[in-house]
Amino acid sequence: MNSKIILLILFVAIAGVFACKKDGEKVGSVTQNEITLINASSDTLNVYENGARINNGSTLLPSGQYRNLEIIAGNQHYQFKKAGNPNALFDIGLNFDFSSSYTLFVAGQSADKVFVLKDTVNRDTLRSAYVRYINASPDAGNIDFTIGSLPTLKSLSFKSATSFLSVPAGKVFYSMVKDGTDTIAAGTLTFNSGVAYNLFTKGLVNGKGTNALGARVLIAQ
């Protein structure tokens, strides 16, 4: 083979190696995080991060949740769409630090109905369960929460939440009361020891069907 051709091939190969290295240096590592996403709205949703759908397994049903939903840490752009509809209900920028755990609540069809809670559970004993109260009802006003023998937590406003509280494992009575007089939900729940739960209101005062005012409890951790 002509020596000039051989030198040309070697030059192209070496240049390609350096080009790949240069391009590779431009691509930084992407820091991942996992969050919990709870749908406290009446819509079946799909969620997009920077244009890519992230709830790939299935749609997010009303009163349902996705745990361990993989996202990119830091400031990212999110869209929420009704399942089967290409148009976004709303767009929102959110910042999730890679070193913390979060739960994101969607309580309606606009960005002001979205809120994020940081998840911190201090398990002092595995013989107890741990419950956090959340008001995820946009128009229900302040709500009083009672569970077991714990003191009543009064006047939790929309988007407000308690820390995770230690409660006895097993069956316990609970109630959620609007404005101190109107009971939203009441009854008994069974909690497993060592498990953390989100106990939240959802829906609207005059809502119907999946949008009716009510309560839901989901495992947090």
Image (cartoon, grey):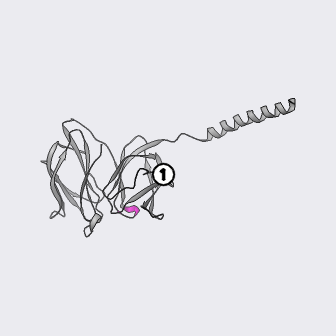
Give the class, few, some or many, for how many residues have Cα within 10 Å of label 1's Cα (few <14, many ≥20): some
What residue is rendered at 41% in x and 40% in y? 99
Residue lying furthest left in this view?
149
Q: Is residue 2 above or below residue 39?
A: above
* Near-viewer residue (85 or 136): 85
Quadrant occupied by the N terminus: top right
Left or right: residue 97 compared with residue 8: left
Magenta residue check for 193? no
Which residue of the protein is positioned furthest toward the front in this rendering? 1
Residue at which label 1 appears: 76
Q: Residue 172 placed where, x, y %?
A: 14, 48
Q: Is residue 101 left or right of residue 186?
A: right
Identify the residue at image location x=40%, y=44%: 34
The residue stretch that appears in magenta: 108-112
Q: Quadrant of the C terminus?
A: top left
The amino acid type, in three-letter code, at marker 1 is Gln
Residue shown at 33% from the left, 63% from the top: 42
Q: For residue 159, what is the image quadrant?
A: bottom left
Residue 50 lies, with reference to residue 109, above or below; the image says above
How many labels, in total? 1
Q: Secondary structure at mark 1?
A: strand
* x, y percent for residue 129: 21, 42
Q: Indicate the quadrant where residue 209 lies.
A: bottom left
Magenta span main SS: loop
Q: Nearer the viewer, residue 96 or 48?
A: 48
Q: Position of residue 175 (x, y in %)?
A: 16, 56
**Vertical position of residue 29 compared to residue 113: above or below:** above
Measured as percent of width and height from the top left, residue 29 is found at 54, 39
Does residue 67 show up?
yes
On the question of residue 151 being in view, the answer is: no
In this view, 159 is above or below 19: below
